[in-house]
Image (tube, helix red, strand yellow):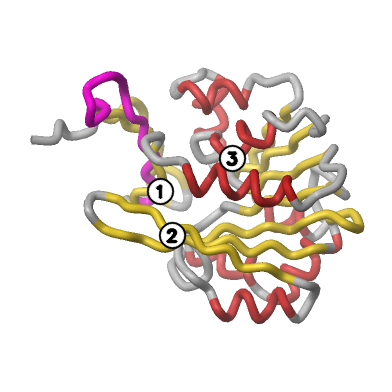
């Protein structure tokens, strides 16, 4: 019988409630942290393979990833994987939920605290959309831009995030990437329309990731576009 998660902290935002929760690890050896956004399970620390893959696959295709932008802080696992690459000198993380940024500074979850306090990282509370259009700080260009701000255009937690996946927004984001760098987009499922839009801008690779969760086999997707 699974022990129900306990809420560590929560906050009401203009986009709905966000909550950081914890529950015992299934094998009883530790604690699993969960992030819930607007009543929707967003991620946990039990299986971080796709967040890690977003960083690893993108870094492997980038010759000199000195400056990196990560859209979406989450529990910090994508950024933590980026930091393991010693070629990376600076990481900007843009997170729309100021409360989550604060929870990171307070280290309310281990990896979240590690990346939020890391000397090579600067976490910015704000909307990544204007940043990708060059209308807000931080300013690019970057060698690598990783976007994990929602589940993808066909399964949005926040409807306003639809604009991030529009062709004009993707083109603007690609303009923020140095030549030879990568724009990478994470999705919770295959997104054929997104692939078509990206391929219309530059060479794009679709990577499918199979993950088993609670007895269900799920397929996530990464879209890597070369600037």
Query: Would residue 200 be found to the left or right of residue 205 on screen?
Result: right
In front of the other: 39 or 113: 113
Q: Quadrant of residue 199?
A: bottom right
Q: Which residues are magenta?
A: 24-38
Q: Residues within 10 Å of mark 3 (few under 14, many from 20)?
A: many
**To which residue does mark 3 refer?**
78
**To which residue does mark 2 refer?**
157
Q: Earlier in the sequence, mark 2 or mark 3?
A: 3
Residue 80, percent from left and from top: 61, 31
| Circle 2/circle 1 CB separation < 8 Å | yes
- At 69% from the left and 30% from the top, the residue drawn is 83
Q: Earlier in the sequence, mark 1 or mark 3?
A: 1
- Residue 31 lies, with reference to residue 201, above or below; the image says above
Residue 35 located within the stretch drawn in magenta: yes
Estimate the spatial distance between the alpha carbons at disc 2 and disc 1, rounded to whole Å.
9 Å
- At 8% from the left and 35% from the top, the residue drawn is 1
């Amino acid at each position: 019988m699974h022990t129900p998660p306990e809420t560590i902290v929560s906050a009401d935002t203009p986009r709905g409630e966000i909550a950081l929760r914890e529950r015992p690890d299934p094998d009883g050896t530790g604690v699993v942290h969960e992030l819930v956004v607007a009543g929707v399970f967003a991620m946990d620390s039990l299986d971080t393979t796709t967040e890690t893959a977003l960083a690893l696959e993108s870094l492997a295709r980038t010759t000199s990833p000195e400056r990196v932008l990560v859209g979406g802080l989450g529990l910090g696992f994508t950024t933590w994987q980026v930091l393991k690459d010693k070629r990376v000198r600076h990481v900007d993380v843009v997170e729309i939920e100021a409360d989550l940024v604060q929870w990171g500074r307070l280290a309310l979850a281990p990896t979240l605290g590690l990346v939020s306090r890391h000397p090579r990282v600067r976490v910015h509370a704000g909307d990544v959309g204007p940043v990708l259009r060059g209308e807000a700080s931080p300013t690019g260009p970057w060698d690598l831009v990783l976007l994990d701000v929602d589940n993808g255009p066909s399964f949005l937690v926040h409807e306003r995030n639809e604009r991030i996946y529009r062709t004009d927004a993707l083109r603007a984001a690609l303009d923020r990437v140095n030549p030879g760098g990568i724009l990478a987009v994470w999705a919770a499922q295959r997104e054929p329309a997104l692939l078509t839009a990206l391929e219309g801008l530059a060479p794009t690779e679709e990577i499918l990731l199979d993950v088993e969760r609670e007895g269900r086999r799920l397929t996530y997707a990464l879209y890597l576009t070369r600037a």
